[in-house]
Image: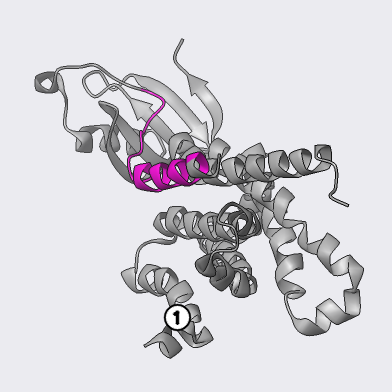
Amino acid sequence: MRKIIMSALAAATIAAPAMATGKVTCDVPESEWQPREALEAQLTAEGWTVRKSKVDGGCYEVYAKDEEGRKIEAYFDPATFEKLYVAQRGKVLFEKK
Amino acid sequence: MKAIVNHRIFFWTLLALPAVAAILSGKDAADQLHGTGEWSARLLILALAISPLVLVARRARWTLWLQQRRRYIGVAAFAYAALHTFYYVMDMETLPAILSEITIISIWTGWLAIIAMLLMALTSNDASMRWLRAGWKKLQRLAYPAAILTLAHWLLIHDGVTAALIHFAPLALLEAYRIAHHLNRRKTPAHA
């Protein structure tokens, strides 16, 4: 029992840096992607203040303040810029059906 | 060498290194949240893990070494939580903004966790131990709800579910061992 606990602890410590990301994934060929700057510009025009954006799970992920001043995290299709998911501190505000 | 390693200043320096690195990085407040929160959780987990570790490792020297430093680890866990909260407040900028998200479950669990850790940190000194007597130990057991609130905060706030579970799994395992150990001991009749 003690040995099992000790080896499980060691395994968990070694495995710790390997982390999965994202609850939303996109499967769009990269050749069809539009530039991320274009998405940022579109969102800014719609009243968002974009803090940063990156690629996560094949989608564009944007950290921003929305038109209501809420700090949000949003996912978009990188080709169509379709909105897929928006959350405020983990509270889901929008999820594409 | 041994004297340096065992000196409390050495240990405090060790505990402060991630904070120094974070502050010197000059990152935006919003980008500091993840790292400072993660260090707070790690240290809280470590502080709680020490007692069951002593049990599992049968009072191995390194576990006793950690046990002597548990207070520092616990206070550091609070300090990182305070830094984390500081960056959060900096990022939110205004009180109405902060209050507007306080009803979100991922946020209020964080606030409750730091309140619990604040009470523990304030009483992490010999004077409080004397003053509170038996109540001191009860008060320090706030570490358990603090850990559960921290886990909930981490699981709910972002997509860091895997990271959160990997951090808390060792503690869960150790606590399970401790509970099993105590149940076993109760079953075995005491030797005359």
User: Residue B123: x, y in percent?
Assistant: 77, 74
Q: In this view, does B137 lie to the left or right of A62?
A: right
Q: Which picture quadrant has residue B128?
A: bottom right
Whether residue A1 appears in magenta in the rendering, the answer is: no
User: Residue B134: x, y in percent?
Assistant: 90, 68
For the point 43% across and 43% down, which residue is it?
A: A7
Please name whichever residue, B32 or A12, is drawn nearer the observer in this view of the structure: A12
Whether residue A20 appears in magenta in the rendering, the answer is: yes
Please name whichever residue, B107 or B75, is drawn nearer the observer in this view of the structure: B75
Q: Is residue A26 left or right of residue B112?
A: left
Q: Which picture quadrant has residue A48?
A: top left
User: Residue B179: x, y in percent?
Assistant: 72, 42
For the point 44% across and 61% down, which residue is it?
A: B29
- Residue span colored magenta: A4-24
Numbered circles on residues, count: 1
For the point 54% across and 61% down, which residue is it?
A: B43
